Every structure is written in C-alpha cells, then in structure tokens.
Amino acid sequence: MTGEADPTRVVADADVLAADLLVGDAAREALDVVRRHSWLELVATEELLAEATAVVAELADADLADDWRATAGALADVVEQPPDDHPALAAAYRGDAAQLLSFDDRLGSAETGAALQGVMDVSVRPPDAFVAVFDPAATYEHAVGESYPGPDRDPRA
C-alpha cells in the first residue's frame, strides 16, 4: 500500500461491476454515487476488469462484454495486481481505496475483516449497505476540506 486508505477511492468487485451493467438495483445505485462525483474514483486491476468482462460475456454476450470493458477501463484507475492476489482486495490495497463493494459474503465476513486488520484499512460491504451509509457531503468535506458542492456529473454520461 502506498499510503493511508483514501475515502474517495472505491473498488467494486467483479460481481458488482457486472450487476451494475446487467441488473441495476443496488449495484447501479452504488456505482452511480461514484459516477456522480468527479472527486470519487473507481479503482480496479486488469484482472478484476477481466473477471467482470467474463461474467458479462457469460450472462449476456461477448460484444456487450467487450464494449463494457473498453468503457470501464477508461473510467477506472487501473493499478497493478501481484500474481495470485484476489483482484478486488489487490485493487483496494494497491489503490489505497477505503471502500470495497462486493456481494461476496466471505469478503465482508468478520473473519476476513480480522485478517485484513493491520494489513489494510478498507470497509467491505455490499452495494446496498454502501448506499445506506456513504455520505458524499461528509466524505468531501473531510477529504477536500471545503463545503460539499453536490454532485457534479451525470452518472449516465
């Protein structure tokens, strides 16, 4: 890790990335929070994006997956992943992200939290929990040191 976890940096696991595109619901709501704010950044690894692309290809089709991959790769801050690391955990660790969104109950378990303690400072939660607790105004004021100006981007652009 290059420094302290940054509350403006968010990782979405492959399941959340695919659900954002294919299902919507809580995954889309959570990632729309990130897309609405230019000062929030989505962090990923090549392996994480490849995993999400494979899920989209399997559940939808290869053309949609390829289009999604091109767009996602341009929007995310792609960081290096060491071999054999979990893609989402590697993205959070290498990208200094304070938030990791996943539907994987194992990542959000107390056991995993205890194992990560002292290694990295990341909050792992499902997208609906992120939406319920993440406060853009408080995060902006803490991270930037100014009054929150509100959302500054169209999440669909």
Image (cartoon, helix red, strand yellow):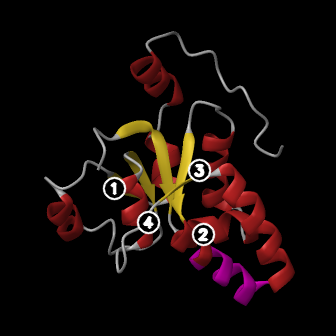
Classify the position of the C terminus by image quarter.
top right
What amino acid type should be assigned to the residue bearing mark 4?
A: Ala
> Label 3 neighbourhood size at 10 Å, few (<14), some (14-19), many (20+)?
many
| Magenta-tinted stretch | 51-61
Q: State the SS at label 3.
A: helix
10 Å crowding of disc 4: few (<14), some (14-19), many (20+): many
Residue 12, compared with residue 40, is above or below; it is below
C-alpha distance separating marks 1 and 4: 9 Å
Give the vertical position of 111 relative to 101 (above or below). Answer: below
> Which of the two residues, 37 or 137, is positioned nearer the viewer here?
37
* Position in image of residue 107 (x %, y %): 33, 69
The numbered mark, 2 or 3, whose residue comes first in the sequence reads 3
Q: State the mark number for residue 30.
A: 3
Q: Position of residue 140 (x, y in %)?
A: 49, 23
- How far is mark 2 from mark 1, CA to CA? 16 Å
Earlier sequence position, callout 1 versus callout 4: 4
Give the quarter of the image for residue 20. bottom right
Q: Which label sits in the foreground, 3 or 1?
A: 1
